Image (spheres, grey):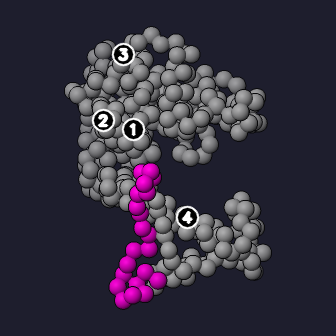
C-alpha cells in the first residue's frame, strides 16, 4: 500500500501460487545451517511496480520509494518478500511462545475497555485488571469498572498513612526530543536535546513471590522469569535492572503508566528503564544517586539497542536540556 502497489492483487497471487499443486502449501521454509544460524526462505511469484500514474500522482508513494532507495521493480519485490518473511517469522515465534491469540487480545483490550464506557481517570486501571483476568470481554470490563467505582467510594478517607506513602512511591522517566545530531551522537559527536512534555511513571507494590510487569497503555503484561537464562529477549532489560539492584528474588508488581507513544523516537524505552530504576530505588530505599540511576538505565538500553549513545537515558534521568 505504501508503495502504490495493488496489495489485493499481490495477496491473491500469493494464495494462488500456494495452491498451484492442487493443495495449499507453505511459501516459506526455515532451517538451520552448519553454524547454527537460522535461515529463512520465501518463494512465490511477485511482481511489484515503481512507475505509472499511481506513483506520479501520489507524493507519499514517491517519498516512500525514495526512502526505500530501490532502483527497479525487482528490487522492490525483494523488499516486499523480505517483509513477508519477517512477518512469517513473527507469527511462528508467537505460536512457539505465548501464542498469537494472547497478543491479539491484549491489543484488543483497549477497544473493549472503551466499549464499556470507561471514564478516562479509570481507563488504565480497568485495562490493567482486564488484561490480568485474561477474559477480554465487554461484560468483564463493565464488571471491573463497577468494582472499582464501589471500592473507590468505600476507600475515601480510610487509607492509613502507611498505605498512602506506599501508593505514592513513584519513579519518573522523561521523554526526549533531539533537535540536532540524533545519529552522529552515537559516534561521539555533540547533539542538542530537550526533554519532551511527556513522561513515564512507575509504581511498585510488594507481592508474595512473582515479579509482574504491567504497561496497560502499551498492552504489555507479563511475569518476569527469575532465572536469567530462561528470560525471553523482551524480559532482559527489566531483568538486568532487577539483577543489578539485587531485587530479582523479591516479589513485586511493577506498574508503568506511559504518556509516550511507542516507536516514535521520543525515548520511550530509556524513560521506562529510568522510571523503573527510580521507583525501585524509592520503594526499597536503596539510596542510589542520579548518576548511578543513569548508568543502570544505560546498561538496560545496551540490551535493547546494542550500541546506544546514552543521550536517551541521560535525558530521561535528569529531564533538562
Q: Could you tell me which secondary element the residue under label 3 belongs to?
A: loop
In the displayed structure, 226 sits above or below 94; it is above
Residue receiving disc 2? 225
Q: Which residues are magenta?
A: 17-37
**Magenta residue check for 35:** yes
Q: Label for residue 193? A: none
Residue receiving disc 4? 82
Nearer to us in this view, 121 or 45: 45
| 86 with respect to 248 (left or right) | right
Other-residue count near label 3 (Cα within 10 Å), few / some / many at <14 / 14–19 / ≥20: few
Please provide percent x and percent y for residue 263.
Answer: 56, 46
**Mark 1 to mark 4: distance in Å?**
27 Å
**Magenta residue check for 304:** no
**Mark 3 to mark 1: distance in Å?**
21 Å
Q: Could you tell me which secondary element the residue under label 2 belongs to?
A: loop
Tags 3 and 2 touching, CB below 8 Å: no
Amino acid at each position: 500500500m505504501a508503495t502504490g502497489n495493488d496489495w489485493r492483487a499481490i495477496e491473491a497471487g500469493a494464495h494462488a501460487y500456494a495452491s498451484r499443486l492442487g493443495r495449499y502449501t507453505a511459501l516459506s521454509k526455515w532451517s538451520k545451517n552448519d553454524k547454527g544460524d537460522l535461515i529463512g526462505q520465501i518463494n512465490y511469484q511477485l511482481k511489484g511496480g515503481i512507475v505509472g500514474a499511481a506513483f506520479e500522482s501520489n507524493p507519499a508513494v514517491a517519498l516512500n520509494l525514495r526512502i526505500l532507495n530501490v532502483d527497479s521493480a525487482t528490487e522492490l519485490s525483494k523488499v516486499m518478500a523480505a517483509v513477508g518473511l519477517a512477518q512469517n517469522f513473527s507469527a511462528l515465534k508467537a505460536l512457539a511462545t505465548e501464542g498469537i491469540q494472547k497478543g491479539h487480545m491484549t491489543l484488543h483490550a483497549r477497544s473493549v475497555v472503551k466499549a464499556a464506557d470507561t471514564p478516562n481517570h479509570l481507563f488504565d486501571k480497568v485495562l490493567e485488571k482486564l488484561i490480568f483476568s485474561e477474559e477480554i470481554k465487554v461484560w468483564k470490563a463493565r464488571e471491573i469498572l463497577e468494582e472499582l467505582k464501589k471500592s473507590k467510594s468505600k476507600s475515601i478517607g480510610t487509607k492509613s498513612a502507611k498505605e498512602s506513602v506506599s501508593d505514592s512511591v513513584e519513579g519518573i522517566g522523561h521523554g526526549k526530543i533531539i533537535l540536532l545530531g540524533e545519529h552522529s551522537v552515537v559516534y561521539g559527536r555533540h547533539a542538542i536535546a530537550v526533554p519532551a512534555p511527556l513522561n513515564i511513571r512507575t509504581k511498585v507494590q510488594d507481592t508474595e513471590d512473582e515479579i509482574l510487569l504491567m504497561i496497560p497503555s502499551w498492552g504489555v503484561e507479563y511475569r518476569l522469569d527469575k532465572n536469567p537464562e530462561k528470560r525471553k529477549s523482551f524480559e532482559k532489560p527489566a531483568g538486568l535492572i532487577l539483577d543489578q539492584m539485587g531485587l530479582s528474588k523479591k516479589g513485586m508488581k511493577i506498574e508503568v503508566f506511559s504518556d509516550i507513544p511507542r516507536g516514535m523516537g521520543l525515548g520511550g524505552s530509556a524513560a521506562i528503564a529510568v522510571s523503573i530504576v527510580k521507583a525501585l530505588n524509592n520503594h526499597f530505599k536503596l539510596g542510589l544517586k542520579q548518576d548511578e540511576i543513569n548508568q543502570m538505565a544505560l546498561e538496560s538500553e545496551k540490551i535493547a539497542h546494542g550500541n546506544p549513545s546514552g543521550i536517551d537515558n541521560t535525558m530521561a534521568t535528569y529531564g533538562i536540556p
